[in-house]
Amino acid sequence: MDGKRQLGEFLRARRSQLRPEDLGVVTYGERRRVPGLRREELARLAGVSESYYARLEQGQSQASPDVLDAIAQALRLSEAERRHLRELSAAARRRPRARRPAPERVSPAVAQLLGVLSEVPVVVTGRYSDVLAWNRAGHALYAGHLDPDGPDRPGERPNMARLVFLDAHTRDLYADWPAKARAVVGTLRLASGQYPDDPALASLVGELTLNSPEFAAMWADHRVKTSDVAVYTMRHPLVGAMDVTQQTLHTEQGQYVVVATTEADSPSRAAMTLLTHSTAAAGPSAVRPKTIAKEAAKEAWERN
């Protein structure tokens, strides 16, 4: 992914999504050939010249932090979108890295967390939604139809974005699938700003764009969305419908620990309890936290 191209695409997309009347821009009723704001209107709101702003959208110039803040204010960006804009601008200035990032692994602390939270579903995902680990309940809730040992094989790990858009089981799991899909795309958008030179991320985006028209449309929209807490109605094939609160914790390694809970004394809690208990009775855990912790500790010791 080219940082300068991404920056220009983001600016053009967000400019096209603003209505002049919402920003107090006088149009005098003339016919407009493009949706949203014109370049000169956005430049005027940001206090920069039209030619300078045009070069930014074309990837031919760089902006200072003050100019980026002015553009963000003119575009009415959220805090997550402002951070994404800054990351895209920084990526546009960096030289591409040739090396592929090392395979991600969970830390000993996260492995301990998985072991402790055995009664609630937990999934650990990486920088672009690869499943790095899950406990037994997490596997049962999100992907009981997949091999529980999948996260143990770096080259074959399930990917939550791929599942949401290309897997029929996962799609049926969410009553409001578009809301979940938009959240997934928003997370990938943030990752594209943080890791613009990652070939695996570019490959994933390309695969989803080719195989899912819905992903392609959402990706082209350039929406950036972060939500550490989200509530979804999930229609599980074993226990029925549940209102599930998904809380996302962020690790120092840039990974995400997703914990799924339900409201106390609710039908959803009863269904979740049934799912976790029936899964526990089925056999050994899908994930071995102690083994993961030992492997992570060994790797840390070897690095030192």
Image (cartoon, rainbow, N blue to C red):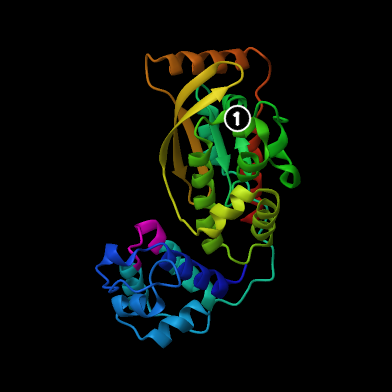
Q: Estimate the x, y position of residue 284 in percent, counting from the top left.
A: 68, 20
| Image height of 282 relative to 288, above or below | above
- The answer to whether any part of residue 109 appears in the image is no
Q: Can residue 133 be seen in this view?
A: yes
Horizontal side, residue 208 vs residue 30: left or right: right
Q: Is the magenta stretch mostly helix, strand or loop?
A: helix
The amino acid type, in three-letter code, at marker 1 is Asp
| Quadrant housing the C terminus | bottom right
Looking at the rendering, the stretch of residues picked out in magenta corresponds to 75-82
State whether residue 7 is above or below residue 218.
Answer: below
Query: Residue 17: x percent and y percent?
Result: 41, 62
Q: Does the magenta stretch include residue 212?
A: no
| Residue situated in front as seen by the camera: 234 or 66 | 234
Can you say which quadrant of the picture contains the N terminus?
A: bottom right
- Return the x and y of residue 230 as percentages of the image width and height: 42, 37
Task: Estimate the x, y position of residue 145 in percent, counting from the top left.
Answer: 70, 27
Compare residues 220 and 86 and report the one nearer the observer.
220
In the visual, does 17 lie left or right of 130?
left
Residue pointed to by mark 1: 172
Q: Is residue 204 above or below residue 72?
A: above
Classify mark 1: residues with Cα within 10 Å, few (<14), some (14-19) or many (20+): some
